[in-house]
Image (cartoon, helix red, strand yellow):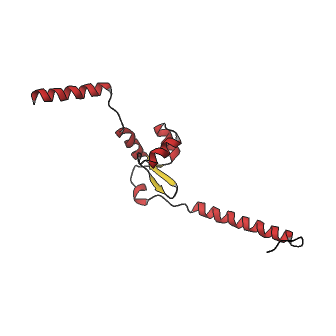
Amino acid sequence: MKVNNTNLFEALELLIQEVVDIKANMGSLRRSTPEPPVAESSRAGNEMIDIDEVCRITMKARPTIYRLTSRGEIPCYKSGKKLYFFRDEIIDWIRNGKKNSYKDLLAEAETYSRSRMHG
């Protein structure tokens, strides 16, 4: 439609209606966000959590979590642009990253040296 002084209001009404239609379509797209993989989310006792909860549990900033996910260092699932996490996997990830204390290292060294002396 070519806009001029005689059809300016008609063109404006048409434009407004198109914006309303676009907003309605965007709303339906948001409602149809893909669900996480069913096989993973249906595991008993394993609650799905979002990145904010992962930040709270790990006490790490959001950019740090994104960096860890891009490096494949933290367990996560991705569907489109959305990241999914499972509480149990995050807690296991934290536990597996435990570093031995000085006391643990001394005990391990003592056990090793005893086995070498008697072996």
Residue at x 81% of width, y 67% of height: 12
Please identify the quadrant where the C terminus is shown.
Answer: top left
Closest to the observer: 86 or 107?
Answer: 107
The single residue placed furthest to the bottom in the displayed view is 1
Residue 72 lies, in percent from the top left, at: 41, 48
- Where 70 falls versus 98 (above or below)? below
The single residue placed furthest to the left in the displayed view is 119
Please identify the quadrant where the N terminus is shown.
Answer: bottom right
Residue at x 39% of width, y 52% of height: 44
Left or right: where 11 falls relative to 102: right
Left or right: where 14 falls relative to 63: right
- Where 55 falls versus 38 (above or below)? above
- Where 68 falls versus 40 (above or below)? above
Closest to the observer: 67 or 27?
Answer: 67
Residue 20 lies, in percent from the top left, at: 72, 65
Give the number of marks: 0
In the picture, residue 111 is in which quadrant? top left
Residue 78 lies, in percent from the top left, at: 47, 55
In the picture, residue 22 is in which quadrant? bottom right
Residue at x 49% of width, y 46% of height: 66
Residue at x 43% of width, y 47% of height: 71
